[in-house]
Image (cartoon, helix red, strand yellow):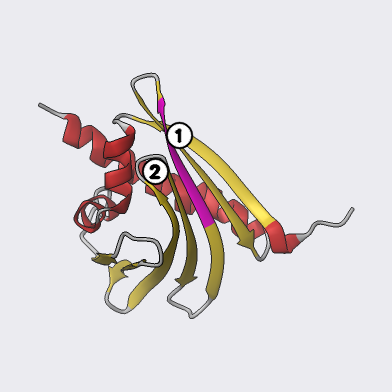
């Protein structure tokens, strides 16, 4: 059996406790991202985010535990259908210089009083990298967004 690793893809979903508009904004607003990027960290790290939310615009995020260990991700917005769907081309660079470019589609749908956020990311160079993104990258990001949204919902 042969696997086409050029098209290794992940698909995952989570119901978040807010409206599609609130989840979309938490996902795309630079100031909100700066909060949720580090919301679960015991010690503050380094987070810088800039967003130009328009088709052809870019989001650049630089983060890490300290200024010497930084990850960088640049996303170019290909489709923006607020608050339903985003499609980006994402290029990430790890502190060791490894670079990877993928396509990310995120949808936001009303679901039982919250929002079903679904991520489809494709173009992973290997199934192991895809699986790492499922277990670590997206699980961590969605935990952070959910924590942020729950805190925002408090009276």
Q: Position of residue 87 (x, y in %)?
A: 48, 54
Give residue 131's mark.
Answer: none
Which stretch appears magenta?
Answer: 104-110
Identity of the residue furthest to the left in this view: 155
- Secondary structure state at the residue bearing disc 2: helix
In the image, residue 152 sits, relative to residue 95, either above or below, namely above
Q: Residue at the spot x=50%, y=64% of the render?
A: 89
Front-most of 144 and 105? 105
Residue matched to label 1: 14
Residue sitting farthest toward the top: 112
Q: Earlier in the sequence, mark 2 or mark 1?
A: 1
Is the Cβ of the residue at disc 2 closer than 8 Å to that at disc 1?
yes
* Residue at x 24% of width, y 53% of height: 42
Left or right of 49, for residue 136: right
User: Which mark, residue 142?
Assistant: 2
In what quadrant of the picture does the C terminus appear? top left
Residue 22 lies, with reference to residue 126, above or below; the image says above
What element does badge 1 sit on? strand
């Amino acid at each position: 059996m042969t696997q086409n690793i050029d098209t290794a893809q992940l698909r995952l979903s989570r119901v978040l406790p807010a409206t599609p508009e609130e989840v979309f904004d938490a996902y795309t607003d630079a100031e909100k991202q700066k909060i949720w990027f580090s919301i679960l960290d015991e010690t503050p790290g380094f987070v810088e985010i800039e967003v130009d939310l328009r088709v052809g615009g870019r989001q650049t995020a630089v983060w890490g535990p300290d200024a010497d260990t930084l990850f960088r991700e640049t996303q170019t917005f290909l489709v923006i259908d607020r608050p339903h769907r985003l499609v980006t081309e994402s290029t990430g660079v790890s502190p060791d210089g490894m670079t990877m470019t993928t396509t990310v589609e995120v949808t936001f749908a009303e679901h039982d009083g919250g929002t079903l956020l679904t991520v489809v990311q494709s173009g992973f160079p290997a199934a192991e990298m895809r699986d790492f993104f499922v277990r670590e990258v997206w699980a961590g990001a969605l935990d952070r967004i959910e924590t942020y949204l729950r805190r925002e919902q408090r009276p």
